[in-house]
Image (cartoon, rainbow, N blue to C red):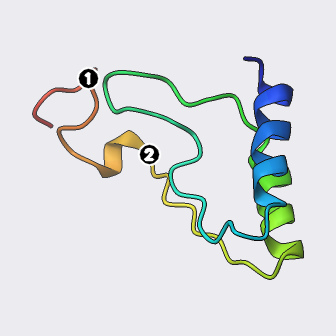
Amino acid sequence: MDGPRMTDRILKAMDDPRMAILGHPTGRLLLGRDPYPLDMDRIFRRAAERGGRGRDQRRPAAARPGLDARTPGS
């Protein structure tokens, strides 16, 4: 699924009043799968419109020693 369609799919899910938490929306698996090509700005804006809060925990790989396949054990 391309980025715009995946983003729209998540935004639609966020409109469901039963939804309380959106965890790990990018689908990334360390050393296994790249993140989905989402428009995170749109997703965070929708969360703010619904009164939610977000937390973006992305950090450069250099800040997480040993988790980057290009620099094993560093």
Q: Which residue is mark 2?
A: 60
Quadrant in which residue 48 is drawn = bottom right
Q: Secondary structure at mark 2?
A: loop
Sort mark 1 into few (<14), some (14-19) or many (20+) by Cα contacts within 10 Å. few
Q: Secondary structure at mark 1?
A: loop
Q: Position of residue 47 (x, y in %)?
A: 78, 68
Pick the front one: 64 or 52: 52
Amino acid at circle 1: Ala
What percent of the width, then of the height, locates residue 44?
77, 61
> From this viewpoint, which residue is outermost toward the bottom?
51
Q: Residue at x 24, y 37 (%)?
A: 67
Left or right: 12 as drawn, with respect to 18: right
Residue drawn at the location 31% of the way across and 24% of the way down: 31
Inter-mark Cα distance, 1 to 2: 13 Å
According to the picture, the residue beneath numbered tag 1 turns out to be 69
Residue at the image position 45 percent from the left and 52 percent from the top: 59
Along the polypeptide, which appears first: circle 1 or circle 2?
2
The amino acid type of the residue labelled 2 equals Pro
Q: Quadrant of residue 29?
A: top left
| 60 left or right, relative to 2 | left
